[in-house]
Image: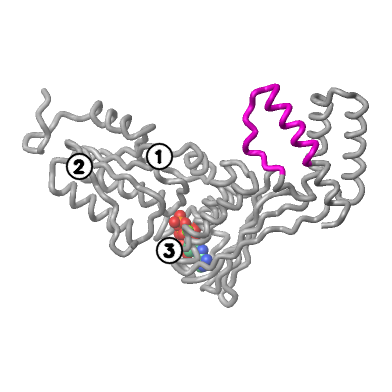
Amino acid sequence: MTETFRIPIIKLKDNLIVSIQGSLGDRLVIQLKEDITSAIERGGVRGLVIDLSGIDVMDSFISRAIRDIGLVARLMGVRAVISGMEPMVAMTLVEMGMGLESVKAALNLEAALDMLARDAPRPLEGFGGKGRG
Amino acid sequence: MSQLETEVLGALRVALSDIIAKSVYQLGLSWSKVDTHRMGPGDGSRLLAELEKGIRIYARDPAKRDACVRRLTELLKDGAAPRAEPDRRLVVSVDEESDIVTARGMGRDLCRELGFSMSVQVKVATAISELARNIVQYAGRGRITITALLNGRRGIEITAYDEGPGIPNMDEILNRKYRSTRGMGMGLVGTRNLMDEFEVRTGPREGTVIRVRKYLS
Ligand SMILES: Nc1ncnc2c1ncn2[C@@H]1O[C@H](COP(=O)(O)OP(=O)(O)OP(=O)(O)O)[C@@H](O)[C@H]1O
Ligand SMILES: [Mg+2]
């Protein structure tokens, strides 16, 4: 089952949405990084939301994967927001001393999308965004 | 089970259902989650104080009430009082990534079954995930045991064993002077921060054994 499964990436207007469920292994993480960067490369993407509401245990490996994806997206000019982290998971991460400070966070998917829409920079010419002013 | 234990459990069940029935009636609370038939002999002494309170509040006939409290106290203090309940132990072999999920799920289920709080459940599952992932990543194979500590101080013990290359720079890692190439390098430090006890035995010839404990109080 895990041989062929890959995490789906949804494109909604100019945002990518990825919902991470359960557990990630090495292979899935590498695949996800590739899929996200190539989706960004295709253009028309200004924001990335990584939704974590389906994660009930987040270890340091997964934290690092998420942080890395956020950083890569940022280097490619895309703002990344994580959303929906379970309260117990958040508390556990803090207690462990794990830093996810480099990634912006929102309470849930809707708030994340609002956040991206709100702080959206003026779209660049020919960047695929629908001009807004 | 001995005659005495059977009697104690019987008395406990009657007293408890009585209290519960009255509580439900008086407070309109839902007690559906209380399953008196799952009580073990060791639960008696732990419940005694609560039972006494309950009996005092709800039993209307003072003579019966005192008799009930006396009888319970006697029964629990003599024979069946804190008698060792066997610790419950699960063993999971860890050979591949999917075993990480299995192991931490089992740890979580055990915690839930024993009524440990959500926060303990998540911490235990996270610690298991870190230790199991390290086994898969650095030793290839090994095993994890999860033990419910039910005598004395209640809690959960997790032991991760492998016969891999060992961890030569343990001090460096625990003092956070180490930079990992595969992760945040926070697995072991994070696990130590989450748990109450953390012990390591490691060497190039013997592999690695890490034992951690989380207590309930
Ligand atoms: N069971 C083990 N056998 C051999 N080496 C290990 C074992 N567990 C950990 N190590 C070594 O100790 C280092 C630190 O482990 P730790 O779990 O703290 O961080 P990490 O695995 O590198 O990153 P992270 O857990 O944050 O993803 C590892 O990089 C690895 O070199
Ligand atoms: Mg690790």
Dot 2 beta carbon under 8 Å from ligand 1: no
Chain label for disc 3: B
Amino acid under label 2? Lys
Of the numbered discs in the image, which one, if any, rests on residue A11?
2
| Image depth: mark 1 or mark 2 in front | 2
Residue B102 magenta-highlighted: no
**Chain containing the residue with disc 1:** A
* Mark 2 Cα shell of 10 Å, populated few (<14), some (14-19), many (≥20): some
Question: Residue A29 or B71: which is nearer the viewer?
Answer: B71
Q: Is residue B141 above or below residue A127?
A: below
Image position, residue B199 (x, y; %)? 64, 59
**Residues at marks 1 and 3, CA–CA distance in whole angstroms:** 27 Å
Q: Is residue A71 above or below residue A104?
A: below
Residue B14 in the image: state x and y as whole percent. Answer: 79, 38
In screen coordinates, is B104 left or right of A122? Answer: right
Q: Look at the picture and state if B101 lies above or below B53.
A: below
What residue did someone put label 1 on?
A101
Q: Which residue is farthest bottom?
A: B205
Q: Amino acid at mark 1?
A: Glu
Asked if the residue at label 3 sits under 8 Å from ligand 2, the reply is no
| Residue farthest left in this picture | A126
Q: Residue at x 70, y 22 (%)?
A: B26
Is residue B32 a member of the stretch shown in magenta? yes
Q: Which quadrant holds residue B207?
A: bottom right
- Between residue A121 and residue A22, name the one nearer to us: A22
Q: Amino acid at mark 3?
A: Glu
- In the visual, does B58 lie left or right of A125? right
Tell me the quarter of the image containing the C terminus of chain B: top right
Task: Identify the residue shown where x is 37% and y is 35%.
Answer: A105
Q: Are marks 1 and 2 in contact (CB under 8 Å)?
A: no
Q: What range of the chain is rendered magenta?
A: B13-36
